[in-house]
Image (tube, rainbow, N blue to C red):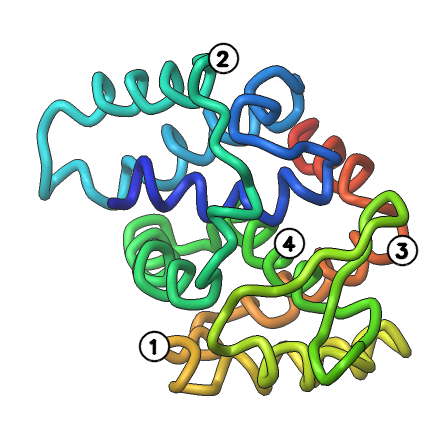
């Protein structure tokens, strides 16, 4: 759950904002391939290695699966029910990593920031929020769309507004089953990443994090 499904949930928004369409695309693009590798081996595996065995082998199988040109899984399909998937697959990783390392998992924080960017709508038409990419409209498919897009619809107005919106969502137990705001520095880190993505684009933000 954490390695295969957790990683592709993080990559759904991040890869989409990098211009990718499928999981295969994210393996072809060097930055997203490196992000996924480091995410799995540096941040996910350490949080479950005492609970499971054979993790390195399974992680490599996962990367091989993502890299298989015969398996081009659409990122928009992964993003169906995105909020529930993020909650069920990845929220515990933040807490476990912090308990283990005493610091935040920055790659995961960027993945969570991409989730927030994903739900900043371009507009609303016929009562439904939509996003834009390359001039095309895409609909959301999530039971929390109205809540998330409603909160984030003004997020790009200012960095302070964005941070307030993120804080409101992270504390909402109908979205996430644990209060991520209790992790020191998480709100500031995720809000900063989200704002940077909005202003500079995901490629620049991702390259900056991977170069550290």
* CA gap, disc 3 and disc 2: 33 Å
Q: Quadrant of the N terminus?
A: top left
Q: On the rendered structure, is 201 left or right of 127?
A: right
Q: Residue at x 20, y 43 (%)?
A: 48
* CA gap, disc 4 and disc 2: 25 Å
User: To which residue does mark 1 refer?
Assistant: 178
Does residue 116 lie above or below 66 as drawn?
A: below
Q: Residue at x 32, y 77 (%)?
A: 177
Does residue 169 lie above or below 59 as drawn?
A: below
Q: On the rendered structure, is 20 left or right of 153?
A: left
Q: Label 1: how many residues lie within 10 Å, few (<14), some (14-19) or many (20+)?
A: some
* CA gap, disc 3 and disc 1: 29 Å
Tell me which label, 4 or 2, sits earlier in the chain.
Answer: 2
Tag 1 near tag 2, CB within 8 Å: no
Q: Label 2: how many residues lie within 10 Å, few (<14), some (14-19) or many (20+)?
A: some
Which of these two is toward me, 201 or 106?
201
Please name which of the two marks, 4 or 1, marks the residue nearer to the observer.
Answer: 4
User: To which residue does mark 2 refer?
Assistant: 69
User: To which residue does mark 4 refer?
Assistant: 114
Please name which of the two marks, 4 or 2, marks the residue nearer to the observer.
Answer: 2
Q: Residue at x 50, y 49 (%)?
A: 108
User: To which residue does mark 3 refer?
Assistant: 199
Q: Label 4: how many residues lie within 10 Å, few (<14), some (14-19) or many (20+)?
A: many
Q: Residue at x 50, y 69 (%)?
A: 142
Q: On the rendered structure, is 117 left or right of 4?
A: right
């Amino acid at each position: 759950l954490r390695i295969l499904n957790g990683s592709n949930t993080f990559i759904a928004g991040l890869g989409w904002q990098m211009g990718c369409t499928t999981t295969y695309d994210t393996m072809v693009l060097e930055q997203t391939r490196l992000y996924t590798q480091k995410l799995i081996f540096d941040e996910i595996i350490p949080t479950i290695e005492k609970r499971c065995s054979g993790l390195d082998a399974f992680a490599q199988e996962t990367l091989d699966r993502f890299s298989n040109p015969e398996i081009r899984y659409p990122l928009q399909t992964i993003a169906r029910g995105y909020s529930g998937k993020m909650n069920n697959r990845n929220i515990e990783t933040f807490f476990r990593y912090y308990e283990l390392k005493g610091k935040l998992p920055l790659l995961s924080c960027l993945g969570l920031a991409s989730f927030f960017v994903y739900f900043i709508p371009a507009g609303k038409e016929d009562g439904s929020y939509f996003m834009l990419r390359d001039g095309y409209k895409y609909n959301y498919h999530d039971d929390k769309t109205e809540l998330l897009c409603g909160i984030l619809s003004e997020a790009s107005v200012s960095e302070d507004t964005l941070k307030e919106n993120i804080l409101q969502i992270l504390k909402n137990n109908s979205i996430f089953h644990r209060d991520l705001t209790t992790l020191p520095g998480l709100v500031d880190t995720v809000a900063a990443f989200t704002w940077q993505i909005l202003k500079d684009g995901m490629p620049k933000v991702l390259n900056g994090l991977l170069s550290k």
